[in-house]
């Protein structure tokens, strides 16, 4: 994808199995995942320490969830604690979660 939001750029790096959020060419946050063909396990949301506290991890998770939802062929397994909390704060997106 890249998708732009103001000065932010969200990219899906399929070869690296991650989504990244950048601004002015600087990495702010990343979301790592594993995709088995039916489920995307979101394993790690990370914000570069110098950029923490600005909601960047939330933006990268939101962008990744929107991308996966738009494809319509995967469920999400929120392995990372941050992603799990994001889904708790966004109950309208819970239908995307893999049923256990």
Image: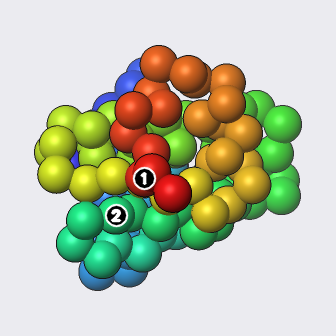
Residue corresponding to mark 1: 98
Q: Position of residue 78 (x, y in %)?
A: 57, 55
Residue 18, quarter of the rendered image:
bottom left
Q: Is residue 43 left or right of residue 73?
A: right
Image point (45%, 28%), residue name: 93
Q: Position of residue 11 (x, y in %)?
A: 34, 53
Q: Position of residue 100 (x, y in %)?
A: 51, 57
Disc 1 crowd rating (10 Å Cα; few below 14, some 14-19, many 20+) is some
In front here: 88 or 16?
88
Residue corresponding to mark 2: 39
Q: Gap between marks 2 and 1, in whole Å?
A: 7 Å
Image point (38%, 63%), residue name: 40
Asked which secondary structure carries label 1, the reply is loop
Residue 91, quarter of the rendered image:
top right
Q: Is residue 70 above or below residue 30?
A: above
Residue 29, quarter of the rendered image:
bottom right
Image point (67%, 24%), residue name: 89
Image point (33%, 72%), residue name: 35
């Amino acid at each position: 994808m890249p998708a732009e939001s103001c000065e932010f750029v969200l990219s899906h790096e399929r070869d690296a199995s991650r989504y990244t959020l950048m601004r002015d060419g600087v990495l702010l946050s990343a979301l790592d995942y594993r995709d088995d063909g039916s489920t995307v396990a979101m394993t790690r949301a990370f914000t570069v320490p110098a950029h923490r506290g600005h909601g960047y991890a939330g933006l990268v998770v939101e962008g990744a969830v929107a991308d996966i939802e738009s494809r319509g062929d995967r469920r999400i397994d929120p392995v990372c604690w941050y992603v799990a909390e994001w889904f708790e704060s966004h109950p309208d997106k819970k239908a995307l979660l893999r049923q256990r």
